[in-house]
Image: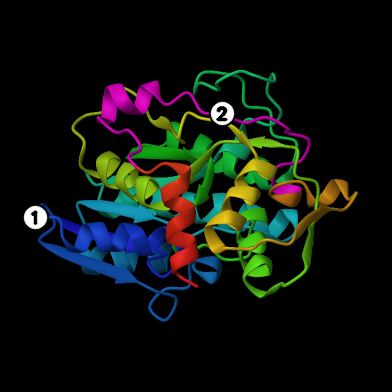
């Protein structure tokens, strides 16, 4: 099978690329970067042209917007999906499309609960709304599409896009103390390598009875616990301070008022045969080793 990977240079896309490069089911892997097709400024015709040239059996979209205004977020997280769906329906209608969504699609959920894919999705941020729109396009698409709702990815290659990435950068540079935003929120941290495994599992699974899958660890810890564990892993012995800044909660505007998050991953286990294999300690060790 020929696979088309979009966003192969990003945090999640790099890990997906590593798996696909060694997968015997992939006859040819095509990684189309911005120099070949800038999806944020493309149109349906140019996407259709790429598909016609590659003729993939599976298309994996690891692109997306983490920040920006509502227009930028919708364009990056839903507009790109709309173009892919329309172009694939015309050029490669039998190919599977896998996109990466977000736990932010659910919005605030009851404290202590495990969120299932059939639970109400009520995002309260533009980021969550944009990803829910992308998922909606997948569930109503005339193509074979799958949307993976990724919870809080951590692990090798994490940048400063969220609190764990910021903490990693600060802890590696500080000597006496570091100051972060509020760390009391509870999150489901999932290793980026496990996310990549879920992507590949969805890409090559047989006919799917469902189109939306949670990708998380199924465990919840406070952000403070995760940061303190990262500090110990790095060898930081200073003080970790929290400032009173409601916009600095984990994920900033992406998480909004959500103070609790834990994925019910039973559907992915049952349908895709996927479960995470990396614990949080392993993820943080990999982050520490990257320097």
Identify the magenta region: 253-277
Residue found farthest to the front:
237
Name which quarter of the figure residue 223 lies in: top right
Q: Closer to the camera: disc 2 or disc 1?
A: 2
Quick check: is 270 in the magenta stretch? yes
Is 28 drawn above or below residue 173 in the view shown? above
Mark 2 lies on a secondary structure that is loop
Residue closest to the eye, 234 or 202: 234
User: Could you say where residue 150 lies in the image, as x and y percent from the top left?
Assistant: 49, 41
Quick check: is 226 in the magenta stretch? no
Tell me the colour scheme of the image: rainbow
Residue at the (48%, 61%) spot, across then down: 287
Residue 264 horizontal side relative to residue 255, left or right: left
Residue closest to the eye, 50 or 13: 13
How far is disc 2 from disc 1 in space, using C-alphas? Answer: 34 Å
Name which quarter of the figure residue 258 lies in: top right
Mark 1 lies on a secondary structure that is loop
Q: Which residue is mark 1?
A: 24
User: Could you say where residue 188 lies in the image, as x and y percent from the top left?
Assistant: 55, 36
User: Could you say where residue 199 lies in the image, as x and y percent from the top left?
Assistant: 33, 46
Q: From this viewpoint, is residue 157 visible?
A: no
Q: Which residue is mark 2?
A: 262
Q: Earlier in the sequence, mark 2 or mark 1?
A: 1
Residue at the (71%, 57%) spot, across then down: 71
Q: From this viewpoint, is residue 256 visible?
A: yes
Prevalent SS, magenta region:
loop
Residue 135 horizontal side relative to residue 227, left or right: left
Report the disc number at residue 38: none
Residue found farthest to the bottom:
35
Name which quarter of the figure residue 2 lies in: bottom left
Is 277 drawn above or below residue 70 in the view shown? above
Residue at the (55%, 22%) spot, across then down: 115
């Amino acid at each position: 099978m020929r696979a088309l990977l979009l966003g192969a240079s990003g945090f999640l896309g790099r890990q997906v690329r590593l798996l696909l490069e060694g997968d015997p089911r992939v006859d040819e892997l095509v990684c189309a970067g911005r120099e070949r097709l800038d999806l944020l400024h493309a149109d349906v015709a140019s996407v259709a042209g790429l598909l016609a040239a590659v003729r993939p059996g599976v298309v994996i979209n690891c692109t997306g917007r983490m920040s920006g205004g509502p227009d930028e977020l919708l364009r990056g997280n839903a507009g790109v999906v709309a173009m892919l769906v329309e172009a694939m329906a015309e050029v490669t209608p039998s190919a599977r499309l896998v996109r990466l969504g977000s736990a932010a699609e659910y919005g605030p959920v009851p404290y202590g609960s495990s969120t299932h894919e059939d639970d109400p999705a009520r995002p309260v941020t533009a980021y969550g709304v944009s990803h829910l729109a992308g998922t909606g396009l997948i569930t109503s698409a005339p193509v074979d599409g799958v949307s993976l709702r990724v919870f809080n990815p951590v692990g090798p290659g994490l940048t400063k896009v969220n609190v764990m990435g910021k903490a990693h950068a600060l802890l590696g540079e500080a000597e006496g103390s570091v100051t972060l935003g509020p760390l009391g929120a509870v999150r489901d941290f999932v290793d980026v390598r496990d996310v990549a495994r879920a992507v590949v599992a969805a890409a090559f699974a047989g006919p799917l009875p469902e189109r939306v899958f949670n990708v998380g660890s199924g465990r919840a810890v406070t952000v403070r616990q995760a940061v303190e564990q990262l500090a110990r892993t790095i060898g930081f012995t200073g003080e970790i301070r929290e400032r009173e800044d409601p916009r600095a909660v984990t994920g900033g505007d992406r998480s909004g008022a959500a103070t609790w998050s834990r994925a019910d991953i039973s559907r992915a286990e049952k349908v895709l045969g996927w479960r995470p294999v990396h614990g949080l300690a392993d993820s943080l060790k990999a982050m520490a080793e990257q320097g």
